[in-house]
Amino acid sequence: MARPKAIIFIDANNWYHNVKKWFRPSDISIRKVAELICSNFNYDLVEIRWYASVPSIKDGEAMYYRHMSFLSHLEKDGIKVITRKLQTLSNKEILEKKKEMIDSLGLCDTCKPIVEENFLSLADIKRKEKGIDVWIAIDMIRLAVLEDKCDVCVLISGDADFVPALELIEKNNKKVLSAFLPLGYSYELRDKFPYFFLGKNKLINCLKSYKEIKGEKVD
């Protein structure tokens, strides 16, 4: 019997702010993390997708170029990098941006209302809006449900905002799994869906080699 095909969706900002409590985030091999999860659940790894906001060069050239170098190394490791620029928007602008994102997907008349109902209100509009969580949610539905690219969506994030997306994916007979650090892991995610703790000892096994770390030079 063929093993379930899995795509890994990573909320990079959520990951970074929790991992840094234990390790320098760039010292962790994202590919090793993905392979650890798939090995544990006997999944075939189809793709790793990294969703991140990108700082402006105006915020500091050193930080900007370190970040871009890190993203470049991810791409060289075969990881699909999806980025959006940081921006602060009003509530009205946020809603308009989300509608534009949904319109750009070319969804059919049946799927579009479902996506709009679940995701126009997604994300905390009081914080700096990046559109990252909405983008991940839509891509999970598109790749798993609409395009049938995978059998299971693995979400690496502790954010409860993804609950509606995961529920919709399950309703369409696809599997979901959330994986995250015990720190910052939403109880709602763990209560509603299969989950996998990425504890400190597991992440130690996912550290890059000295040679890999030496080659990146990022924070």
Image (cartoon, rainbow, N blue to C red):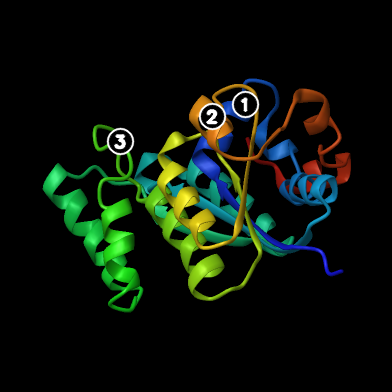
Q: Identify which residue is drawn at 45% across, 35% down.
A: 160
Judged from the image, the secondary structure of the residue bearing numbered disc 3 is: loop
Q: Is residue 153 above or below residue 22?
A: below
Numbered tag placed on residue 140 in the rendering: none
Left or right, 110 with reference to 132:
left
Q: Are marks 2 and 1 in contact (CB under 8 Å)?
A: yes
Pinpoint residue 50: horizontal percent, then vertical percent.
58, 54
**For mark 1, what is the residue?**
20
Numbered tag placed on residue 17 in the rendering: 2
Q: Are marks 2 and 3 in contact (CB under 8 Å)?
A: no
Pinpoint residue 51: horizontal percent, then vertical percent.
51, 52
Q: CA distance from mark 2 to mark 1?
A: 6 Å
Task: Single out the mark in the foreground, 3 or 1.
Answer: 3
Mark 2 surroundings: few (<14), some (14-19) or many (≥20) residues within 10 A: few
Q: Identify which residue is drawn at 75% across, 63% down.
A: 4
- Front position in the image: 151 or 20: 151
**Amino acid found under the numbered disc labelled 3:** Asp
Q: CA distance from mark 2 to mark 3?
A: 17 Å
**Amino acid found under the numbered disc labelled 1:** Lys
Image-quadrant location for residue 125? top left
Image-quadrant location for residue 203? top right
**For mark 3, what is the residue?**
124
Q: Identify which residue is drawn at 20% across, 45% down.
A: 89
